[in-house]
Amino acid sequence: MAKKATRESYGAALVEYGADKSVIVLDADLSKSTKTEMFKKAYPERFINMGIAESNMMSVAAGLASTGKTVFASSFAMFAAGRAFEQIRNSISYPNLNVKIGATHAGISVGEDGATHQCLEDIALMRTLPNMVIINPADDIEAMQCVKAAIDHKGPVYMRFGRLAVEDINAPDYKFELGKGVTLSEGNDVTIIATGLMVGEALKAKDMLKNDGINARVINIHTIKPIDEEIIAKAAKETGAIVTCEEHYIMGGLGSAVCEVVCNTCPVPVKIIGTDRYGKSGKPADLMAEYGLTAENIVKNAKEAISKKA
Amino acid sequence: MDKKRICELSIIANKVRKNALTAVYTPNSGHPGGSLSIADILTLLYFEVMNIDPKNPQNPDRDRFVLSKGHTAPALYSVLAERGFFPVDDIKTFRNISSYLQGHPDMKGVPGVDMSTGSLGQGVCAAGGMALSAKLDNKDFRVYTILGDGELEEGQVWEQAMFAAHYKLDNLTAFIDFNGLQIDGDVTQVMNPTPIDKKFEAFGWHVITCSAHDFNELENAVNEAKNTKGKPTAIIMKSVKGKNVSFMENQAGWHGAAPNKEQYEQAITELDEIINKLEVEYNG
C-alpha cells in the first residue's frame, strides 16, 4: 500500500490546484520541510519566502488576502497556530479573510525534534476562533482534496498535516466533502471516531475488536470545525458508546468537539484518547506507543466505553 | 501648497479633531491624545494624497490606508466621515453596542477602513502584504500606514521592516507618530525606541523626519516617498499628543481617557476658536 506524508500531499496539491494567479504561497524558511518548495519550483513568481518571521507572515497574508488573493501561509503547526495565534485571530479570523494556513509537522509523530516542535494544542487553539475551518486529513488522497476544498472555500482555513508517512486508507475514487464525516466501517456496539493519522489505527482497532466479537463503527472526522454533528449524534444513538482518538491534547481537540455534540444530542459514554503532557524526543512509532496512540489502546478504551453503557 | 489650501486643510483637520473628541466623549471611552496628534496627516492623506472614492470604497485599484495604531480610530472615523464615507453624525455612535463604529477599526463594518487593526504591530505588516500584492500584479496603488512611536516596541514591526526592504516595497509609506508618549509615560523611559531614524535606515528604508502639524512639510515628505524607488519610506513625524487642546497637549494621561462635560466643552471652544481664525484668514 502507498505510504506518503500528508505534508508531501500539501506541496503536490498546491502545484496541482494552485495554477490560478490569485494563489500566493508564503513560507517561513521551512519550504523544504513543509514541501511548499514544490510550489516554489512550479510558480516561483507566486512563492514568497518570509524568512523566520511567522507573526509578520500571518499579518502579511491578511494584507494580501484583503486585496483579493487566496493566500497559503505555511509553517510548522507549532509556529503557525502557536507563535502566530494572535495574528491569526485578529488579522485573519476576525476580519474573515481568505487565508489558508498550511500547518505541517503537527502532533507527536514529529518524533526526534521533541517537545518544542510537537504541536499538540493547535486544534484547541483554532477551534476557539469564529470563522475558522479546521481540516486534519488522514492520508494522501484526503490531503490533496482538502487543499482543493480550502481554495474553494471563501474564508480562513487551518489545515493540519503530518511529517510521518502514512498509509492510504481511502480509495482512489474517494470524494472529500468539507464538513462531512466519513463512515469507514459500519457497526453497532461502539463507535471509534478518529482524525488524521489516528484513522489508520482506528481501522486496525476495529479488526481487533471484531476478533473479540465486537462490531465497531469507524468514523473519520477530517473536518474538525465545523464538525459533522449529524453523523456523531447518529453514532451516539445507534451504538451507545464512543471512543475518540487524535494526536493532540485531550483538552480542546476532537474529543472535546465530539463531547460537545454528544452532550447536546444523545449523552452516552465517551472515552477520549489523546495526550495530557508534553511530548519528547524519540522514534515516532515508539512515541505513539508510549503516549497511547495505538490500536491496542483504542481497543482497551472501546471495551471500557461499552462497559459504561447505560 | 498655496496658503488657501493649507487653510482649508487646517480647518478640516480641526473639524476632525472636534469629531474625534465627540466620538470619545459620547461613550465616555476611547483614545483622544493620539487621535489629535494624527489629525493633520489623516486630513492630508484623505483630502489631498490618496486615490480614493467614498462612493466606491472597494475599488481594487484604490490607494490603501492602514491605521496600525488602531486605538486612534476616532481620528480615522472622523476623517472618513468628513470625506463622505458615512454620515458625520454617526460619529456619536462610536463604541455603542448598536453601532458599526467599533472601538478599533473594523474593515468588515466601516466603509473606507481597509484593514481591521487594534492589536499593535499587525497593521504595518498587513500594509506590507497589500504593497506586495500591488507589486505582484504590477498595479500602481500605494499603501499608507501610521504607527505609534510606542508601537515600535512590538517585535513584529521590525519583522515587517526587514520584509518591506527585502522585497523593495517602494509603494509602502509608514508614518511614525512620534509624540514621545505612551500609556505608562515617556517612550524613552518606558522602553526607548529611539533613535527611530537610524533603526529604519539600518533596516534599509528611506527615512524622512518632519513636523506632524505642517502641511507643507508633510506634503513634501509624501512626495519624496513617492519618488523614492527601490525601498520603502518611513516618515517620522514629530507630533504633539493632544494637539490643539491646551490641557491635553503633551499629557500621557490623555492617551486613553475621555473628557468630562466641562473638559469636552472647553476643548470644543478652543478648537472652534482655531477654526474661526482660520476661516477669517481664508476669507481675508
Image (spheres, coloured by chain):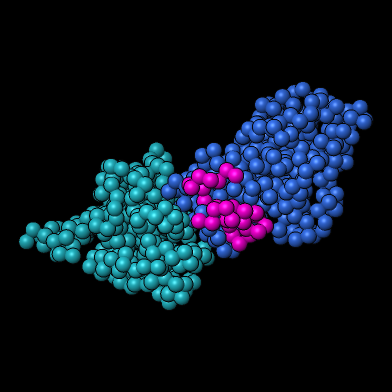
Visible residue check, residue A291: no
Residue drawn at point x = 42 percent, y = 71 percent: B205
Q: Would you say residue B166 sits in the magenta stretch?
A: no
Where residue B1 sits: x, y (%)?
A: 18, 65
Q: In the picture, residue A190 is in which quadrant? A: top right
Determine the residue located farthest toward the right in the rendered image.
A212
As drawn, is A232 to the left or to the right of B91? right
Question: Which chain is displayed in cyan in the rendered image?
Answer: B
Where residue A136 sits: x, y (%)?
A: 68, 42
| Quarter occupied by the C terminus of chain B | bottom left
Residue drawn at point x = 45 percent, y = 67 percent: B165
Question: Which chain is displayed in blue in the rendered image?
Answer: A
As drawn, is A39 to the left or to the right of B7? right
> What's the magenta region?
A16-45
Question: Closest to the observer: A56 or B42?
Answer: A56
Determine the residue located farthest toward the top in the rendered image.
A238
Q: Would you say residue A22 sits in the magenta stretch?
A: yes
Determine the residue located farthest toward the front in the rendered image.
A42
Question: Closest to the observer: B186 or B119?
Answer: B119
Q: In the picture, residue A152 is in which quadrant? A: top right
